[in-house]
Image (tube, rainbow, N blue to C red):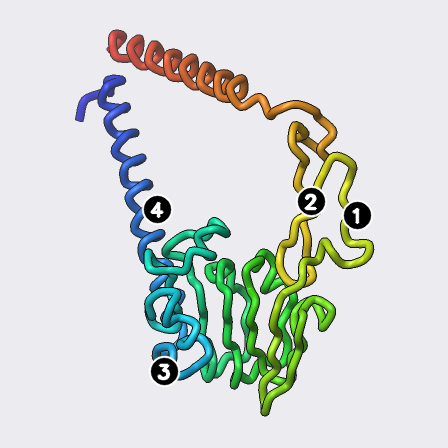
């Protein structure tokens, strides 16, 4: 093994590791959705609410309805990803605890019925802006409370939560947003404040567009300088051996 390593060799090794990392990220992104849809055995049951909604929305994969190119135009107008999860059927899955459903945050319909769930945090559905039909065990309340839904109905051993309301339209909600910001819905009973046009920064106090080009120029320049210094250092070490 040589005592010194050239800068070109270090660069090649560095690029190789970057390639491996990006490949791993790509493989994970391709596999994460099917794995999530198969956390529960079986598939979406024929005749269920999720199955009926999926007939015109996409395709069945495990316990999910995946929105694809045949999705309705209304979903495309909302800016949803073609291959996002439109429906999720985790009914009869023997779930006693549920902490994370973030991979289904674009879902319109979710069925959690017939599970021994005794408690469920409202934060599980934070960011579920498109959720309009939720089927819960009767012991659980609708996330955000009844005031966050147009219709709450009990049928048999299930609780139906339909028509998610915009939290920003509820009395007093938008008052919590600072000046120069807008209230935006962020799931049942939740909202978030986003800076109005031409404002950015902490509490939207800075006016004008975010200086993206300047920031990228500074970062790019710093990267070039550091890379040049490392190259010169490695060259000197290689020559000194």
* Mark sitting on residue 193: 2
Q: Which of the two discs, 1 and 4, sits closer to the camera? A: 1
- First of labels 2, 4 by sequence position: 4
Separation (CA) of disc 4 from disc 3: 34 Å
Q: Observer-nearest residue: 90 or 82? A: 82
Local secondary structure at mark 3: loop
* Mark sitting on residue 176: 1
Q: Residue at x 17, y 26 (%)?
A: 1
Q: Position of residue 100 (x, y in %)?
A: 53, 64
Q: Observer-nearest residue: 176 or 123? A: 176
- Tag 1 near tag 2, CB within 8 Å: yes
CA neighbours of label 2 inside 10 A, class few (<14), some (14 to 19), many (20+): many
Looking at the picture, does residue 160 appear above or below residue 68? below
- First of labels 1, 2 by sequence position: 1
Q: Observer-nearest residue: 137 or 84? A: 84
The C terminus: image quadrant:
top left
Looking at the picture, does residue 216 appear above or below residue 238? below
Looking at the picture, does residue 85 appear above or below residue 92? above
- Tag 4 near tag 3, CB within 8 Å: no
Q: Quadrant of residue 139?
A: bottom right
Q: Which residue is mark 4?
A: 25
Local secondary structure at mark 1: helix
- Would residue 35 appear left or right of 131 to someone viewing this image? left
- First of labels 3, 2 by sequence position: 3
CA neighbours of label 3 inside 10 A, class few (<14), some (14 to 19), many (20+): few
Q: Quadrant of residue 154?
A: bottom right
Q: Residue at x 65, y 69 (%)?
A: 143
Q: Which residue is mark 3?
A: 46
């Amino acid at each position: 093994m040589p005592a010194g390593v050239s800068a070109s060799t270090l660069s090649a090794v560095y690029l190789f590791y970057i390639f491996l990392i990006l490949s791993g990220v790509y493989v994970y992104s391709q596999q994460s959705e099917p794995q999530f849809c198969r956390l529960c055995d079986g598939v979406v049951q024929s005749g269920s609410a999720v199955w009926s909604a999926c007939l015109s929305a996409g395709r069945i994969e495990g316990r999910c309805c995946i929105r694809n190119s045949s999705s309705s135009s209304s979903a495309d107008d909302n800016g949803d990803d073609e291959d996002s999860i439109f429906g999720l059927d985790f009914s009869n899955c023997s779930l006693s605890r549920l902490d994370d459903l973030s991979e289904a945050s674009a879902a319109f319909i979710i069925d959690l019925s017939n599970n021994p769930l005794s408690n469920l945090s409202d934060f599980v559905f934070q960011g579920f802006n498109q959720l309009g039909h939720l089927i819960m065990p009767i012991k659980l309340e609708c996330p955000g409370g009844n005031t966050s839904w147009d219709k709450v109905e009990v049928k048999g051993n299930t609780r139906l939560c339909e028509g998610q309301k915009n939290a920003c339209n509820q009395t007093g909600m938008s008052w919590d947003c600072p000046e120069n910001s807008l209230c935006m819905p962020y799931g049942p009973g939740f909202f978030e404040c986003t800076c109005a046009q031409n404002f950015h920064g902490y509490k939207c106090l800075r006016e004008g567009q975010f200086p993206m080009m300047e920031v990228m120029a500074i970062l790019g320049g710093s990267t070039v300088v550091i890379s040049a210094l490392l190259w010169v250092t490695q060259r000197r070490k290689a020559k000194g051996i």
